[in-house]
Amino acid sequence: GIQVEQSPPDLILQEGANSTLRCNFSDSVNNLQWFHQNPWGQLINLFYIPSGTKQNGRLSATTVATERYSLLYISSSQTTDSGVYFCAVDHDYKLSFGAGTTVTVRA
Amino acid sequence: DVKVTQSSRYLVKRTGEKVFLECVQDMDHENMFWYRQDPGLGLRLIYFSYDVKMKEKGDIPEGYSVSREKKERFSLILESASTNQTSMYLCASSSTGGGGQETQYFGPGTRLLVL
């Protein structure tokens, strides 16, 4: 099956810092989604981004499908950004998830 | 707003018990999914359904079955619970169509402990 690798596995940030999370995938995909899981376990879709760049407030994402990677940018991080960020790719109409990046933002 | 609800947030069962996890969505979505989440492994797909009474195996279906008798409800069944099925179980739903409609919406999860 398709392999999805996320890096780094863990990230500790000071409030106000910027960061970049990376997602590499091993095959062509129909679409790619980024999710945030809050400390209570709720998963929220951040971006549906099969290609190109999208922005939503302090978050933005870029997918370069031809090179099989996607990047999630967090700017001016806040403590509410803490949690686990997952990348998921749609291959054969099923989502395959990476292992996630755990982000901790300290006040 | 899309709402996906799961029957329990926390559940404790004994080895060998039959366990039912229920998921309900209120957005008339065609597709529903069951995942389990374990530390360091991300989410892994157990089963999914594209229509009523239809089911497809995901990546890890062994030890599980599912039922979808109504469009809004998708049940996950552990026929005989085992300790290695202790996990967080997440249900999701999505619509069918292009342009981002396939975005999956997740329930709050059920933390199952099998003793």
Image (tube, coloured by chain):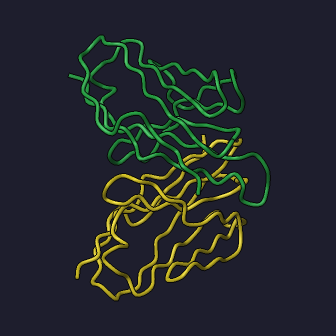
Chain colours: A yellow, B green
**Quadrant showing the N terminus of chain A:** top right
**Quadrant showing the C terminus of chain A:** bottom left
Q: Quadrant of residue B66?
A: top right
**Depth check, front residue: B82 or B113:** B113
Residue furthest toward the left?
B115
Residue A77 pos. (x, y %): 37, 82
Tally of marks: 0
Residue furthest toward the right?
B98
Residue at 52% in and 19% down: B65
Q: Quadrant of residue B56?
A: top right
Q: Is residue A76 left or right of residue B99?
A: left
Q: Is residue B55 left or right of residue A10?
A: right
Image vertical order of residue B79 relative to residue B74, above or below: above
Residue at 36% in and 35% down: B8
Residue A44 pos. (x, y %): 49, 59
**Depth check, front residue: B42 or A5:** B42
Image vertical order of residue B13 relative to residue A51, above or below: above
Q: Is residue A87 left or right of residue A78?
A: right
Q: Is residue B38 left or right of residue A25?
A: left
Image vertical order of residue B63 relative to residue A24, above or below: above
Residue B46 pos. (x, y %): 51, 31
Residue at 71% in and 47% down: B95
Residue at 50% in and 68% down: A22
Residue B59 pos. (x, y %): 54, 32
